[in-house]
Image: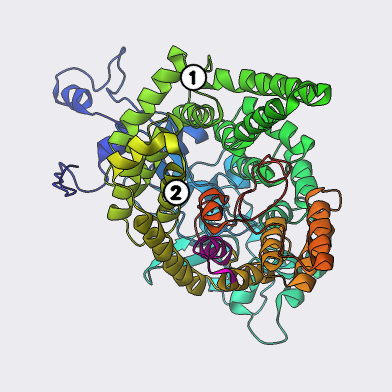
Amino acid sequence: FASDTYKSQYNEIDVSCETCHGPGSVHVDLAQGRSMFWDRRIRYGLTNTLKGASTERQTATCAPCHSRRSMVHPDYSAGDSYLNHFEPSLLHSGLYHADGQIQDEVFEHGSFTQSRMFREGVKCTDCHDPHSLTLKFEGNRLCAQCHQPGKYDGPAHHHHPNAAPGAPETQCVTCHMPTTTYMGIDHRRDHSIRVPRPDLTVKLGTPNVCNRCHTEPAEDAQWAADAVVKWYGDKRPDDPHHAEAIHAAQQGDAEGEGLIRRMLRRKETPEYIRATMIELLAAYPTEESLRLRREALTDDSPLVRAAAVRSLAGVLVAINRQIDELREAAGFNPAAQSQASQLTASLTELVKELEPLLGDPIRTVRFATASLLAEGLPPQSAVRDSSTFKDVIAEYRAGQSHLLDRAESHRNLANLALNLNDPVVAVESFRTAIRQQPYRTDFRTELSQLLAKIAADPTQAEVWKKIGGTEEEINRLREEEVGLLERDSKLLPKNAGPHFHRGRLLFLLQRPDEAGDAFAEATRLAPNNYEYWMWLALIRERQQRWDEAVEAVNKMAALQPGGGEWQGLYQRIEQSRRAGDTPAAKRDDDAARDAAPPATAVSPTQTLPANDPPTTPGQKQFNPDGN
């Protein structure tokens, strides 16, 4: 790690026996011994014997190689808990389509565990020979192990009466497991084994397999959807489909929360989908959303529990911030004192619900919980001072120390150092992350934000000296990030995120006209995102472009009629316009640069997560200066 170079050595460069069965020396000794090739005490001498294993155990054995995941702790051995060593990617935009179909190369585990086949107990080895790596049978005979050929292997089911036997349009996998090609050579089948839904293409724009072959102008998605209704009727056993809920939430639509609530009530909703929905609820800062996320902390699925913890990111910070503000303003104000007491009680209750998860049997859940509590609680809190918390933090550091060839690990350690009040280590970790992965967005935003915060704090003068910070470095990082976001906006022309984050950085660089253009483009691409309209309103207010500012506020009001933020902003804009003054939001430029809300870093394929309630202190007046 010191030289940033690899010196890898291999015993076996590919999948071997021990990959799936664990250490095999005892197994070999048994085979070479004179006694029977079995022992009453140790059976076959394997740590992971898969004969008769459950569907969950077998798929978890395959998952380390066959899933899109990040490593959370090294030294995985076959038979270990998958989630003790890996954290799989959920159904995030850019990785999966809203209905769960594969989009980016996510391999098989996340898809297969969504399927009805998985829920019914089908295993990988029901179709694949794990040793020869071949299918057990060719053609539809593979599916006929379970499905009656007379019912499913004929024109009455596939509706291609003129197709020759064995033709692609007669094959089960053609319609139920379509391929997506990656890197030009990797033809990967979608293992969610789903029923084609051209009606969702019409509603949401998700792909459907029918229109892969039927490409004539008259054979559009509506034509295909009408054909399905003609054949099977207009009722679907899985309606309303979870795609509608996920799509609405990803687009920031107001109805997304209600659709998610409805889907979460379904007991058969797969855990990958439930976990994804719990994460998406973070964009809805309502009492019901918070209740569902807290309820999910005790879910049977560790995947859902971890998602529930992540969905609460920012909530503890927001509550603490509100409490501090109320206490500062309380004085002899009984109402403020009462509100602060109520918030303190709410915070205590939430921490009580989170604290047991520090002892969760699954490492992924423990790490998410420790990270949340480190960020959201003050250093002197009893939870952060507990031996349990410190043990999990040490375990997390140990895991990340084995992954220092990845820039994300340095970023993770930087954020941990920040939360544990060690800004020097945080800065150096961010700098290392940028050096290792110079073409990635978000690292520069986070580092420039941290440097600006240190520079603005007189009590951090010694830290500023230790890290060798300069105003030039802050501006250079921001300029470089703007360039990377311009690249991303060209690579992802339909994604609003790069435009929005570029706008915030351009504002900090005192380029308001360019910032306004970026915010305007973000609202064009994501017209239902409240925060995008808020920032456009603020920048137009600063530019004294009153009509455009009011138009943006009207969009905010339409999206959140009950919100109080747009009302105060509207009154301020009208007041400034009537007075002919410079906008009330305009402040000293240096103070604006130092105090502006941070441009939260996310990947270019995501919109900015809105984890904090809209009444979070620091947002009440909605000045882009942060004042």
Left or right: residue 460 compared with residue 141: left
Q: Residue at x 38, y 39 (%)?
A: 414
* Magenta stretch: includes residue 505: yes
Q: Measured from the top left, where is residue 308 in percent x and y? A: 61, 34
Q: Measured from the top left, where is residue 142 in percent x and y? A: 51, 54
Q: Can residue 467 be seen in this view?
A: yes
Q: Which residue is drawn at 24% across and 48% down?
A: 14
Q: Give 207 or 475, whichever is nearer the viewer.
A: 475
Q: Residue 412 carries which label?
A: none
Depth check, mark 2 against mark 1: the one in front is 2
Seen as rendered, the residue at the extreme bottom is: 217
What kind of element bears circle 1? loop
What kind of element bears circle 2? helix
Identify the residue position indicated by label 2 in the image.
452
Label 2, residues with CA under 10 Å away: few <14, some 14-19, many ≥20: many
Q: Is residue 380 above or below residue 277?
A: above
Left or right: residue 608 compared with residue 252: left
Label 1, residues with CA under 10 Å away: few <14, some 14-19, many ≥20: some
Q: Can residue 296 be seen in this view?
A: no
> Which contiguous range is marked in magenta?
498-512
Q: Measured from the top left, where is residue 165 in percent x and y? A: 56, 72
**How many numbered circles does the render carry?**
2
Identify the residue position indicated by label 1 in the image.
384
Q: Which residue is drawn at 37% across and 46% down?
A: 408
Picture quadrant where residue 164 is located: bottom right
Q: What residue type is labelled 1?
A: Arg
Q: Give 447 or 239, whichever is nearer the viewer.
A: 447
Q: Give 403 or 383, whichever is nearer the viewer.
A: 383
